[in-house]
Amino acid sequence: MRAAVQRVSHASVRVASETVGAIQKGLLVYAAASPDDASADAAYIADKVAHLRIFEDADGKMNLDVQQTGGAVLLVSAFTLCADARKGRRPSFDASAASPVAEPLIQQLAAAIRGFGIPVETGRFAAEMQVQSENDGPICILLDSKRTF
């Protein structure tokens, strides 16, 4: 499982003209599952997201996690995180899990983050979504449950 984590001042996701998820200060997390991912991969990413110390403390150092700042998470499924663009000009999405595998894992990821006491809003799986955000920093962190980077 992969995730791109952005520290945001606010973020929202819309499907058609309906806002389906929105947060103020917190983390915008794009997540994707691979075909061989399992519950342990979702748990690993959830733990990382919940405990990333990327918010500033009183001394201006990135020492606090999202919960310590009273923030929330907006989780958006984005199969393109598993894209392979090393060859040619058109990315391959073969490393992305099909919906029957990916959707339950994304739901498990949301539930696991909530299990840490963090409010989680979500997009709508497999929908055409418009995401708006204001990156705070900008701070962007890449996570991979297989630890390839």
Image (cartoon, helix red, strand yellow):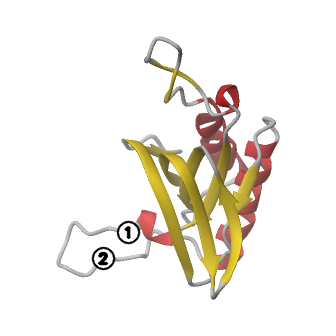
Q: Is residue 140 visible?
A: no
- Please identify the quadrant where the C terminus is shown: top left
Residue at x-position 62% and y-position 29%: 51
75 with respect to 93 (left or right): right
Q: Position of residue 139 (x, y in %)?
A: 40, 41
Residue farthest bottom in this picture? 16
Q: Position of residue 88 (x, y in %)?
A: 17, 77
State if disc 1 and disc 2 touch (CB < 8 Å): yes
Vertical side of 4 occupied by 46: above or below: above
**Which secondary structure, mark 2?**
loop
Note whether residue 122 is visible.
yes
Residue designated by label 1:
83
Seen at 69% across and 43% down, the residue is: 43
Crowding near the residue tagged with mark 2, few <14, some 14–19, many ≥20 C-alpha atoms within 10 Å: few
Label 1: element kind: loop
Name the residue located 49 percent from the left edge and 47 percent from the top edge: 5
**Which numbered marker is on residue 32?**
none
Q: Furthest residue to the left?
A: 88
Image point 65% across, 86% down: which residue? 17
Residue denoted by label 2: 91
* Identity, as a three-letter code, of the amino acid under mark 1: Ala
Residue 80 shown left or right of residue 26 in the figure:
left
- Residue 52 placement (x, y as % from top left): 55, 31
- CA gap between label 2 and label 1 equals 6 Å
How many other residues sit within 10 Å of disc 1, few (<14), some (14-19) or many (≥20)? some
Q: Quadrant of residue 35?
A: bottom right
Q: Quadrant of the N terminus?
A: bottom right
- Residue farthest top in this picture: 59
Does 126 sit above or below residue 146? below
The three-letter code of the residue at mark 2 reads Pro
The quadrant in which residue 91 appears is bottom left
